Amino acid sequence: MTASHTHPRRLWNPSFRRSDRRCAVPDGQAARQPALTGGPFRVGRAHPAPLRPQAPPEPREPLPDVAVRMSLPDGTALTVRPTGPGDKAEARAMHQRCSPASLRSRYHGPVRDADRYLDHLLNGRHGRSLAVTAADGRIVALGHLMWDDGKAELAVLVEDAWQRRGLGLMLLRRLSAMAREAGIGTVYAVTHASNTGLITTMRRLSAPLEFHAEDGTLVITAVLATAVPAAPQPGR
């Protein structure tokens, strides 16, 4: 399950601006998506303008910089921890282990230079990132929460060999909890309209969702509850 943010052109009206420098391809690189051909979603109304536009907020309090150990139902040991620029080499290695299809779904196009993406995504000025590591220390999944004018964008990439094991849902729930702690009540993910895996996973956040589709690109917006429950372990 993967997701990202890109814009072949400016799709939204001014009240629904999405910057090209969040979880998207860097420096305005873009790939036009195929026309929308249906899927298990409905096309909702355009997103309303925020009542009080503001700059991306800083967290009210420092987010916890701790690693959490957990295990999958089959007993596989994992660690979820904050990640940053110091993890770039291992994050790049994970990208190299991902299939072209997974990378294309995540970034809406081929990934020619992962370093450029990671320099932005792992920079703490733009948001927060989490890594899931295996027992040998390899990063097997990455999740990003990127500030965007009072909202935040969610994006997740899971290595192919670790997909369909609950890591994507676990990361999305933890990132949503981090957004609430930072004082952000609205998060969104941008993906292909055909990405049924992400659509299904977003529905499991137990938050009201709104869908906006255009030219094959789907924006899924979630309004978070006042209190986000503790993120469960994968597989639960």
Image (spheres, rainbow, N blue to C red):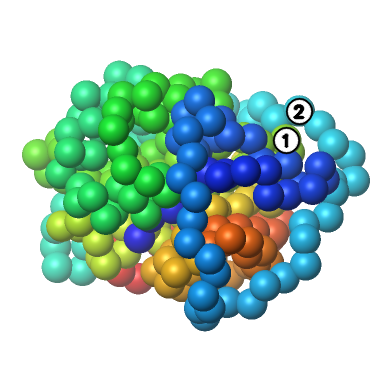
The image quarter in which residue 113 lies? top left
Q: 153 or 100: which is nearer to us?
A: 100
Quarter in which the N terminus is drawn: bottom left
Say which residue label 1 marks.
149
| Amino acid tagged 2 | Ala
| Amino acid tagged 1 | Asp
The 10 Å Cα crowd at callout 1, few under 14, some 14 to 19, many 20 or more, is: some
Asked if residue 202 can be seen in this view, the reply is: no
Residue 49 appears at what percent x and percent y? Answer: 85, 48
Quarter in which the C terminus is drawn: bottom left
Left or right? Give the position of 17 relative to 188.
Answer: right
Q: How far is the residue under mark 1 from the one under mark 2?
A: 5 Å
Residue at horizontal 67 percent and vertical 43 percent from the top: 10
Q: How many marks?
A: 2
Residue 81 appears at what percent x and percent y? Answer: 34, 37
Residue 57 appears at what percent x and percent y? Answer: 70, 30
Mark 2: which secondary structure?
A: loop
Residue at horizontal 63 percent and vertical 61 percent from the top: 214
Q: 197 or 234: which is nearer to us?
A: 197
Residue at horizontal 33 percent and vertical 50 percent from the top: 104
Q: 69 or 171: which is nearer to us?
A: 171
The image quarter in which residue 101 lies? bottom left
Residue at horizontal 53 percent and vertical 66 percent from the top: 35
Question: Contact, CB < 8 Å: mark 1 with mark 2?
Answer: yes
Instruction: Answer above or below: position of 141 versus 168.
Output: above
The 10 Å Cα crowd at callout 2, few under 14, some 14 to 19, many 20 or more, is: few
The image quarter in which residue 183 lies? top right
Say which residue label 2 marks.
55
Left or right? Give the position of 73 relative to 121.
Answer: left
Asked if residue 88 can be seen in this view, the reply is: yes
Q: Which mark is residue 75?
A: none
